[in-house]
Amino acid sequence: MNQYRNPVIRVLLAAVGLFIGVALPAWATYDVNIPPPATPVSAQIYGLHMYILWICVVIFVIVFGAMFYSIFKFRKSKGAQADVNFHESTLIEVIWTIIPFIILIAIAVPAAKAVLDMKDSSNPDVTIKVTAFQWGWRYDYSADDFGFYSNLKTPWSQIGQPGIPATETKGPDYLLEVDNEMVVPVNKRVRLLITSADVIHGWYVPQLGINQYGIPGFIKDAWFKAEKVGVFKGQCSQICGKLHGYMPITVVVKSEADYAKWVAEAKAKWAAPAAAPAAAAAPAEDLSKKYALDELKAMGEKVYAGNCVACHQANGKGTPPAFPPLAGSKVVLASADKQIGVLLNGRPGTAMQPFAQLSNTDLAAVITYTKNAFGNATGTVVQPADIKAARK
Amino acid sequence: MSTAAGGYYFAPPSKWPVVGSTALFFFASGLVLWMNDIQPMGSVSLLLGIGILTYMLFGWFGVVIRESESGMFNKQVDVSFRWSMSWFIFSEVMFFAAFFGALFYARVFSVPWLGDLDNAMIWQGYSAQWPTAGPYLDKDPAYAFATMGAWGIPALNTLLLLSSGVTVTWAHHALKANNRSQLVLGLFLTVALGVVFLGFQVYEYAHAYSDLNLKLTSGVFGSTFFMLTGFHGFHVTLGAIMLTVILFRCIKGHFKPDHHFGFEAVAWYWHFVDVVWLGLFIFVYVLV
Amino acid sequence: MANATAHGHDHDHDHGPGPWTRIFTTTNHKDIGSMYLWFAFLMFFVGGAMALLIRWELFQPGLQVVQPEFFNSLTTVHALVMIFGAVMPAFVGFANWLIPMQIGAADMAFPRLNNWSFWIMIPAAILLFATFFVPGGAAASGWTLYPPLVTQGGIGVDMTILAIHLLGASSIMGSINIITTILNLRAPGMTLMRMPLFCWTWLITAYLLIATMPVLAGAVTMLLTDRHFGTSFFNAAGGGDPTMFMHIFWFFGHPEVYILILPAFGIVSQIIPAFSRKPLFGYASMVYATASIAILSFIVWGHHMFTVGMPAAGNLFFMFATMLIAVPTGVKIFNWIATMWRGSLTFETPMLFCIGFLCMFTLGGFSGLVLSIAAVDITLHNTYYVVAHFHYVLFPGAIWGLTAAVYFWLPKFTGKMYNETLGKWHFWISAIAFNITFFPQHFLGLAGMPRRIPDYALQFYEWNAISSVGAFLLGASQLIFLYNVITTIRSGQPAKEKQWEGADSLEWTHLPSPVPYHTFETAPSLK
Ligand code: HEA
Ligand code: HEA
Ligand code: CUA
Ligand SMILES: [Cu+2]
């Protein structure tokens, strides 16, 4: 023990005490564990973690109990003599190989069950397509044909800049608030089809037990069944560039009735405009008709406002790098068929999805519009027939 | 001066390692600049790097060869060379493993996935048939390509490489039997076969680009095809160069029937290149 | 460490005129070992400085210190520097110093190649650091370099990739050299199963290196061609898959993390017996455990990818395989403790660091086990829980293993004894500071704080503040280390030939302190 009378050690032990003194109160007040689960799967996760945690604590205590015992019992300063022959024993070696193995099996069984449960996304009640992009989310409720973007709401005046302190005080939901939340019904199986428009992102909401990469060009699915109404928050979990830290997720779980109400409003607000009309207009459209430039531009402006403006902006300048400008864009200024191809097939690996669902007339109109707006003065006119020809 | 004191070999101080690192510095930086078309700095630095590297190789191997010929390498050193060469070849195998892995992954997993039900949301009507340039490029006629048949040039190339394996072994036996003329002949044939192989390879690439529209950019098929065959071709080139060096050394009368690891090392390398080709022939050409 | 400079001059005939020519042209395993160690030490401080910048930014919510993009670059380069610049070269440095001495050889098998392995790291380091000054800045994708994010990067990414190629080449040459030395240059009577464990763990590590470094080279080469030559390995549009990169990268990446710990296992396996004054418990099973860890490490890579959406079967396989690794690792922990059992223990600085290693590494191992449970990993993946996990295995694991080795062998290398009191201060301060820094990160991770973010929600504030304070204390403790090492080399008390009475490997039993410039001119006689 004499070395614990050594001033060095004394001071340091004091420091340990101080740390505990600081940490424990903190512990009492701040989150130290997985947030309360809201779905059967996340409940399993929570349980599993506690289970393994305690197993580890027990092993730790036993193993290092033995170590500290020898540290205090077998120290030379207390005249301990080394027993140089004690350096092999097949028996104990076998024992301490087998026991951990058994413990692992005890962990593996419930763990495997949880994995199988979270992978079983069969017969969903609601399906939502989640498209990540730099740096936000798009949620498409395909069954009800509407979809919307969900972006960070916290103003930069709260975040500040290196050297320039924030001018506003940070709100309670700092960095966890979005303009449009994803809304789902309670006690229903919700299936998410997760993908990305640019780089890999991660749709991560701990309380729903979901953390799934959105991978460009692939659809990956995940599911959850929220068992209580409420607001659940998460963040993008996979580094995706400059604003990776600034693309939060908020899911609002509502009662059946409230959900139905919300869907009704959402449809009105975000109905993928052309989709429905196009279906209606399709038979009516006359492919032989040759429109004049101005007619097409006028029609195209509406189509643009309905489909393109969200990303490429009203001024056609977009919001690079995620959404390229159309003003002065190579593709737009190039020959018509190039741009037709892009609109019919989309641009894989980017946010540009196919717009083949639009009618030939709408496509012809919007292409003509972009080729003759925002200072693009190609004078090119694209007729519905050209689109029809390009469709295969 | 090197000594083999008590069976131990001490190398004298040498400037070559630093020269080599300088070469690699210019080479790497040159490559970066060149790829980002920052010219002429890129090409200059690249060439400088290659130049210094060649200088280093001549200098360094020169030293080793002189030491070897002056009988400075005892049995133990010889064994060291054997171990190191074997494990170096093993690491090369792992390098190719990465690219074969990519090929298998694409064929077995990613391409079929892209064709499955969920992904139909993004890639309407993609058939996911190998060979493929991928769900997007396949739609674009500009990317339509034909594949290289296996039983034309590739089969011929297989024969060439296999027989070159035979000739090099023949040369080795000649060396052990101290039959110098046969040794030189065998080596010469090996180099010749290697060079012809490369010639065919170049022709095949030209054919792919001009007639088949099969390019490095032809989706994952083009990527794996050209990267695998390309790196193999590069290794054949290295092997051929090394064989040529050995050939000249043999002509100069280097190597003894009982002491010629330089020769064996290159022979091993050549066999390795040979085996990799068999893998290529089967997985890249035959099983498309 | 710099003793070669201090004690070489009695062998002038063997090295060039001035010290400079000598640094460039040396073929002596001790010179090269010292160069490796100093290089690693420098890199540790640079990487640490970056870590401190990271922690400074994370001291409170909001952006105060760096731009988000630069923050990502810091994270990326911090990791690359610590792994490829600090830990790996430091281990190679000790391999250079110790392996020839411990197996009774004169030098490494290929002295010139050995020098080249070191000098290749210099252009690599230049390329890597230069990325901070090129347009577009340094790679900002995290050290895992996932496409397509990394494809968006600028010229800095290409420089990073080339730097990785060079470092890989250096590691492969170094490993081949070590393998050959161990397999072929052992003194008569030094059978494989008589080798000190440091040689064993390094032999196995070297195999991991030659098996995985080429694969990494392949992976980054594909990145390069995807970036510049229009290939589609990682692009779905062309039939590739970003996930494919992850598979190839982690096939390298997981064995890599054992590359970062196995040599430390070897070091600990030699220091604990020395201060327990009794032979290592279960020598043979230690060797087999190390081997099985290495073999298993090739089939567990998928545990980094539980959230990419692998089929359930994939997640299950990788989960079970990963859990298995706890068994051989456990065997090692138990053997070390059994070595202390019924020993006659003293607690000089190296022993303190080894005891710290045991506790803290095991803690990191446990958090690893928690992460290996695919279901649990869903909530913890890419959170600070992971950051806590790997710093527990990397800092008290790799770094403390190395620190213990420095204190343990410095007397042998330099013939001078370090300052024991300072050593103890170094241990206790870094032990406390380390836990202040990283223990709270478990809480942050569990509460759901993602990694690689420069700014965070208010609920994460307190633990981050504590963690940042700890980090600066930890940094300060490393300055004590630096001071202690330098003063030892400059003006330490003379060390005994057998400074540690329990030490039993050849460098202690057959060689004076400091060791002569040429280790064994002739084979030592072993009974
Ligand atoms: C030195 C480096 C090192 C070491 C040794 C380990 C060891 C282990 N690691 Fe770790 N790991 C990393 C470095 C390391 N890791 C790094 C750098 C990352 C992050 C990479 C990145 O994304 O940037 C990572 C990430 C990582 C993940 C991915 C997390 C995620 O991204 O979601 C996982 C998941 O399974 C994991 C698991 C393990 C396991 C099971 C071990 C096991 O080897 C641990 C075994 C040890 C013990 C279990 C303790 C001792 C055993 C006993 C006392 C016996 C009794 C115990 C039981 C029966 C339980 N690690
Ligand atoms: C061996 C590997 C190693 C080591 C030793 C360390 C050491 C440290 N790491 Fe490291 N770290 C990694 C490997 C390592 N790390 C990896 C692989 C990642 C993942 C990267 C990724 O996500 O891609 C990571 C990521 C990482 C993060 C997460 C960043 C993010 O997700 O955005 C953090 C944050 O706290 C961190 C902190 C630290 C700290 C405080 C130390 C401290 O232990 C450092 C202490 C040492 C010093 C501080 C040195 C002394 C220096 C001074 C005293 C400064 C003054 C001197 C000068 C200015 C010359 N590290
Ligand atoms: Cu999106 Cu991170
Ligand atoms: Cu791992």
Image: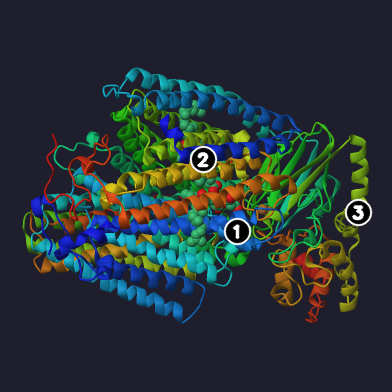
Distance of mark 3 from mark 1, alpha carbons? 37 Å
Q: Are both tags, 1 and 2, on one chain?
A: no
The yes-or-no answer for disc 1 within 8 Å of ligand 2 is: yes
Residue C175 percent location from the top left of the image: 32, 51
Q: Which residue is depicted at the point 88% across and 54% down?
A: A270
Q: How many marks?
A: 3
Q: Which residue is mark 1?
A: C72
Numbered mark located on residue A269 in the image: 3
Q: Are both tags, 3 and 1, on one chain?
A: no
Q: Is residue C496 left or right of residue C167?
A: left
Distance of mark 1 from mark 2, alpha carbons? 35 Å
Which chain does the residue under circle 1 lie in? C
Could you tell me if residue B279 is visible in this image? no
Which chain does the residue under circle 3 lie in? A
In front here: C497 or C252?
A: C497
Numbered mark located on residue A80 in the image: none
Q: Which residue is depicted at the point 81% across and 77% down?
A: A374
Residue A370 percent location from the top left of the image: 80, 73
Label 2 residue SS: helix
Q: How busy is the neighbourhood of tag 1: few (under 14 within 10 Å), some, or many (20 plus)? A: many
Which chain does the residue under circle 2 lie in? A
Kindly identify the amino acid type of the residue bearing the numbered disc 2: Leu
Q: Which residue is mark 2?
A: A12
Q: How busy is the neighbourhood of tag 2: few (under 14 within 10 Å), some, or many (20 plus)? A: some
Q: Is residue C423 left or right of residue B258?
A: right
Could you tell me if residue A64 is visible in this image? yes
Say whether disc 2 or disc 3 marks the residue closer to the N-terminus. 2
Label 1 residue SS: helix
- Quarter holding the C terminus of chain A is bottom right
Are circles 2 and 3 on residues that touch, CB within 8 Å? no
Q: Is residue C187 left or right of residue C36?
A: left
